[in-house]
Image (cartoon, rainbow, N blue to C red):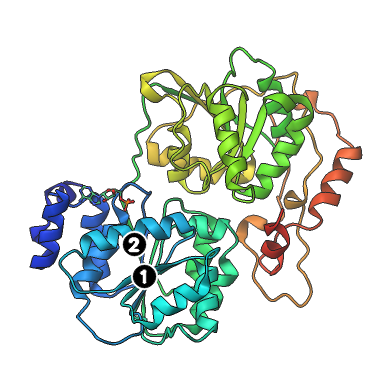
């Protein structure tokens, strides 16, 4: 960390046009991600940077890229930057233009929902750096107006959001038409299994650069935890806690992925209808904004969110953050609990863990160098033995050679909640039927149509 604070722009050995642009912008010191990423990007190695918007990540890749991009009259772009939304295209182009104020280069942004012919004309005039959303990029490449054979550097920004929005197949299609010899630079705010899978499947040991996640939680956040045996028992516990409206007056519930967010929402809907909202990437932007507003204003007491969608959420007076699952990546736990205890108010964080999640819990505790106190499982809460699809032993599909993820394996021996004497067997009934009908089969690595099927919901 000490090293980062002392790095100056002079240490990066930039050139005069870049120094002049930085001067005009009034930037005096590289941000931590800029200091850390510079030499890796400049070296030509593949890289994954873990950084959120607002950390200066755009310049983290653009400074080394612009430093090394020679003037050229050739028409085909040499740098391709893929981002998930049109807003980001506009923003990134704007940043690059600021940094290129004294450089003679051609930057273009393209995205869907606008006239493709205008974009084709702009491309035909020749470009050096292309910023694009994946769908439009692919359409332009197929139309042959856009030649990608000169791409030397591929930047994928907000990989987590990109995958969450279901762009994996589009990305793979694009990889297919890019030259093999290229540098891959990726940025993601959150580490997720989808991001991990993409990296493992398509990139050869990229260097990981992250600004060390703070392992020191705020002192005003009281952290506690429950051991539970499965989804349905967690659900019973959650419902029990939420009944205490006075204590649990503004509750942000985290789950790892959108299917789980939907499932939880559906299960809470009957009892907490008027008080409940949800955000994840299958919801429209308007729906998400409305949900956040409803929660912020206190019209809805409970918000269910995924890690990817809750980044950067700035909501005051969250009484409780509930980790309905135990995050596999300890950094995500730190981000989650940081949503409560803001502005020095007292906050509360709870984490529910099954036996399979104990290892993740230990990693979180190791990062924080503290133990999270265990609460006794309330005797009045029913312990369910009804497993959801993902918790049952998986049957490998025939003709599917893909390996299974470790955490999709059979759940193993039952994990006993504290008050087992109180245990009742939940026979499932209509609930089980409803869930099975809605979700059919669990998402597996081999289920190539998963995103297609679920995208338009
Ligand atoms: P980003 O994370 O790339 O969206 O950048 C967030 C904001 O920080 C943008 O408005 C940048 O222009 C600005 N910024 C980038 N690098 C620096 C720096 N070294 N010093 C001050 N501001 C910066």
Q: Is residue 453 left or right of residue 365?
A: right
Q: Nearer the viewer, residue 110 or 203?
A: 110
Viewer can see residue 366: yes
Q: Nearer the viewer, residue 139 or 261?
A: 139
Name the disc covering residue 379, or none. none
| Residue 125 against residue 84 in the figure, above or below | below
Q: Answer few, some or many: residues within 10 Å of disc 1's Cα (few below 14, many 20 plus, some between 14 and 19).
A: many
Residue 323 in the image: above or below residue 393? above
Picture disc at residue 93: 2
Callout count: 2
Task: Tell me which residue sits at (50%, 87%) in the image.
Answer: 144
Percent position of residue 194, x then y: 55, 60
Q: Label 1 belongs to which residue?
A: 108
Q: Is residue 187 left or right of residue 264?
A: left
Q: Is residue 68 left or right of residue 117?
A: left
Residue 80, percent from left and from top: 38, 73
- Image coordinates of residue 289 in percent, x first then y, are 56, 39
Q: Quadrant of residue 105?
A: bottom left
* Rendered residue at 50%/60% (across/down): 195
Q: What's the distance in space between the residues labelled 1 and 2, CA to CA?
A: 7 Å
The answer to whether marks 1 and 2 mark residues whose Cβ atoms lie closer than 8 Å is: yes
| Element type where label 2 sits in the image | helix
For this view, does 366 lie left or right of residue 129?
right
Task: Tell me if mark 2 has few (under 14), some (14-19) or many (20+) residues whose alpha carbon lies within 10 angstroms of its own.
Answer: many
Task: Write down the quadrant of residue 183 in the picture.
Answer: bottom left
Disc 1 element: strand
Q: Work out whether residue 326 or residue 175 is closer to the camera in this orientation and state it.
A: 175
Residue at coordinates 62% horizontally, 62% vertically from top-left?
A: 405
Residue 277: image quadrant is top right
């Amino acid at each position: 960390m000490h090293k980062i604070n002392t790095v100056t722009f002079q240490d990066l050995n930039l050139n005069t046009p870049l120094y002049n642009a930085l001067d005009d912008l009034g930037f005096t010191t590289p941000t931590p991600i800029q200091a850390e990423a510079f030499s890796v990007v400049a070296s030509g190695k593949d890289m994954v940077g873990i950084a959120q918007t607002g950390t200066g990540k755009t310049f983290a890749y653009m400074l080394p890229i612009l430093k090394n991009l020679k003037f050229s009259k050739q028409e085909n772009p040499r740098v391709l930057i893929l981002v998930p939304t049109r807003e980001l295209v506009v923003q990134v182009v704007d940043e690059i233009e600021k940094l290129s104020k004294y450089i003679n280069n051609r930057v273009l942004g393209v995205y869907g929902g606008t006239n493709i012919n205008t974009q084709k004309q702009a491309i035909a005039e020749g470009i050096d750096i292309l910023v694009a959303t994946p769908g439009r990029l692919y359409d332009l490449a197929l139309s042959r107006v856009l030649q990608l054979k000169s791409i030397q550097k591929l930047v994928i920004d907000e990989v987590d959001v990109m995958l969450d929005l279901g762009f994996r197949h589009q990305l793979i299609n694009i990889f297919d038409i890019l030259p093999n010899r290229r540098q891959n630079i990726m940025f993601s705010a959150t580490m997720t299994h989808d991001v991990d899978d993409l990296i493992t499947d398509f990139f050869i040991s990229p260097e990981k650069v992250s600004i060390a996640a703070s392992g020191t939680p705020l002192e005003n956040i009281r952290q506690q935890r429950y051991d539970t045996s499965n989804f349905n028992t967690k659900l019973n516990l959650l419902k029990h806690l939420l009944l205490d409206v006075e204590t649990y007056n503004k509750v942000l519930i985290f789950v790892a992925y959108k299917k789980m967010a939907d499932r939880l929402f559906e299960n809470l809907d009957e009892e907490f209808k008027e008080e409940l909202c949800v955000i994840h990437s299958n919801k429209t932007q308007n729906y998400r904004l409305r949900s956040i507003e409803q929660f912020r204003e206190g019209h809805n007491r409970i918000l269910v969110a995924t890690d990817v969608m809750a980044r950067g959420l700035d909501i005051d007076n969250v009484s409780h953050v509930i980790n309905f699952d135990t995050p596999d990546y300890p950094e995500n736990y730190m981000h989650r609990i940081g949503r409560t205890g803001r502005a020095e108010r007292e906050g509360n964080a709870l984490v529910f863990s099954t036996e399979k999640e104990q290892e993740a819990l230990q990693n979180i505790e190791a990062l924080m160098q503290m133990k999270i106190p265990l609460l006794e499982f309330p005797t009045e809460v029913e312990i369910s033995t009804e497993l959801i699809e993902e918790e049952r032993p998986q049957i490998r599909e025939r003709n599917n050679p893909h390996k299974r993820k470790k955490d999709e394996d059979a759940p193993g021996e039952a994990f006993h909640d504290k008050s087992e004497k109180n245990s009742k067997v939940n026979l499932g009934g209509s609930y089980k039927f409803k869930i099975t009908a809605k979700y059919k089969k669990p998402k597996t690595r081999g289920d190539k149509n998963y995103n297609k099927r679920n995208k338009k919901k």
